[in-house]
Amino acid sequence: MSPRRVLLKLSGEALAGEQKTGFDESTVKEVARQVKLSVDAGVQVGIVIGGGNFWRGRTSNAIDRTKADQIGMLATIMNCIYVSEIFRNAGMKTQIFTPFQCGSMTDLFSKDEANRCLEDGKVVFFAGGTGHPYFSTDTGIALRAIEMEADCILLAKAIDGVYDSDPKINPNAVKYDTITIQEVIDKQLGVIDLTASIMCMENKMPLAVFSLNEKDSIANAMQGKINGTIVTA
């Protein structure tokens, strides 16, 4: 069954391509092409983007954690503005919401307004995380998916699903077709961070994990065709 409303999580690093920093425009254009297929088919799409292509503040001991997280929030806003413009160039209408005022570049988040935008066929970007330090974009997408009553969270990653161990280290790692969020927590599989995992478990929000690099993986996932791992709640 195809979902009616999804929230898609993109990593900043994935959007940077092989250069590992900044933006790889061809990668972002390919994401836009796939999302447009789903939008044209009537799927309501919200997007959260990480900031790792610009900032990894937790690797530095020289900066206060709160300030490091604030820089990370700004990195996600830069990503959303860029990707939003690529989406518009591809023929989609977009709206960017942040949990704090950000001049005239974004709109202050409102559930009612975000709902209207989604129902009008706009792709809605949720930038700036939760607006608070100590919460990741994993927590941000869990919060927005629950709040916006999405059918599921789609996690487009560099890896093609959830494994019982790191396949980069263990060549015998086994991929799960389905797994419960409780098992993810108990086995510390790190699909999303612990705070986000518990939020999804408590609010029965399912997830799907798949490879960003597989052909048409986003478009397929938005039509309910998951060639990865489904995490049930």
Image (cartoon, grey):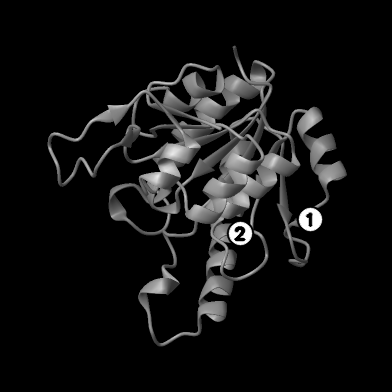
* Residue 127 position in % (x across, y down): 64, 55
Q: What residue do we see at 66% from left, 22% from top? A: 43
Q: Amino acid at mark 1?
A: Asp
SS assignment at label 1: strand
SS at badge 2: helix
Q: Earlier in the sequence, mark 1 or mark 2?
A: 2
In the displayed structure, 171 sits above or below 16; it is: above
Instruction: Name the residue beneath numbered marker 1.
Output: 107
Residue found at the far top of this picture: 1
- Quarter of the image that includes the C terminus: top right
The residue that label 2 is drawn on is 77
Label 1 and label 2: CA atoms lie apart by 11 Å
Circles 1, 2 touching at the beta carbon (< 8 Å): no
Quadrant of the rendered image containing residue 135:
bottom right
Quadrant where the N terminus is found in the figure: top right
Query: Residue visible at 58% across and 53% down?
Result: 139
* As drawn, 144 above or below 22: above
